[in-house]
Amino acid sequence: MKILVFGNALVKKDSLALSVAHALEHDAELRGKGIEFVEFDTAENLEDEGPDITILDVASGIKKVTELTDMDRLEKSPSYSMHDFDLAVTLKLLKKIGKIKTVRIIAIPSVYEKKRAVKEVKEALTSKSDFF
């Protein structure tokens, strides 16, 4: 399973998902499950990744690593121009026009320490049989 990792390594508050993916990419247990982490720069061409997408990203307003599957619960950022389209808007649009069917987001609280985030993401990927 390919997990698309979003974030910006140059912005500390937006780099945690990338850092977690780098820490887990060589984990033998996850590799044995066929889990592969792929950095994804922007939401452009997201539909090329297939109809069922799994994403690792940071989020505000959550208290622990959380799996999000209901795109209607995603909050969008204020948009003032086409440059302001964020991941939530893109996912909702792609689903509405039938380009994607399902989305699973492994959301990491943006205020987490890396060690805690790595532990909880790994637990989420290894302990939930229905995650896949």
Image (tube, helix red, strand yellow):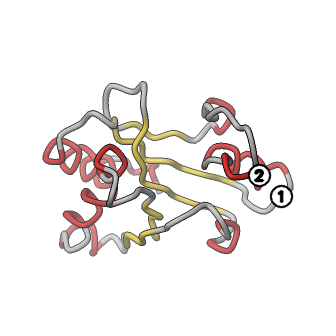
Q: Nearer the viewer, residue 42 or 72?
A: 42
Q: Amino acid at mark 1?
A: Gly
Q: Residues within 10 Å of mark 2 (few under 14, many from 20)?
A: some
Q: Which residue is mark 2?
A: 95
Number of residues whose C-alpha sits closer than 10 Å to that of mark 1, classed few (under 14), some (14–19) or many (20 or more): few
Residue 22 position within the rendered picture, expressed as x and y whole percent measured from the top left:
24, 67
Disc number for residue 125: none
Residue visible at 62% across and 47% down in the picture? 86
Q: Label 1's element?
A: loop
What residue lies at 25% left-to-right and 53% top-to-bottom? 122
Residue 110 rendering spot, x and y as whole percentages:
33, 37
Q: Specify whether 98 is left or right of 64.
A: right
Quadrant containing the N terminus in the rendered view: bottom left
Mark 1 and mark 2: Cα distance apart in space: 5 Å
Q: Where residue 27 sits: x, y (%)?
A: 19, 69
Mark 1 and mark 2 in contact? Answer it, CB < 8 Å.
Answer: yes
Q: What residue lies at 61% left-to-right and 31% top-to-bottom?
A: 75
Residue furthest left in the image: 115
Residue topped by disc 1: 98
**Amino acid residing under circle 2:** Lys
Among the 4 quarters of the image, the one containing residue 44: bottom right
Tell me how many marks there are: 2
Residue 3: x and y in percent read 44, 64
The one nearer the camera, 58 or 120, is 58
* Left or right: residue 114 compared with residue 47: left
Q: Is residue 72 above or below residue 17?
A: above
In the displayed structure, does residue 10 sit left or right of residue 81? left
Kindly indicate the quadrant of the structure image that contains residue 126.
bottom left
SS under mark 2: helix
Residue drawn at point x = 49 percent, y = 68 percent: 40
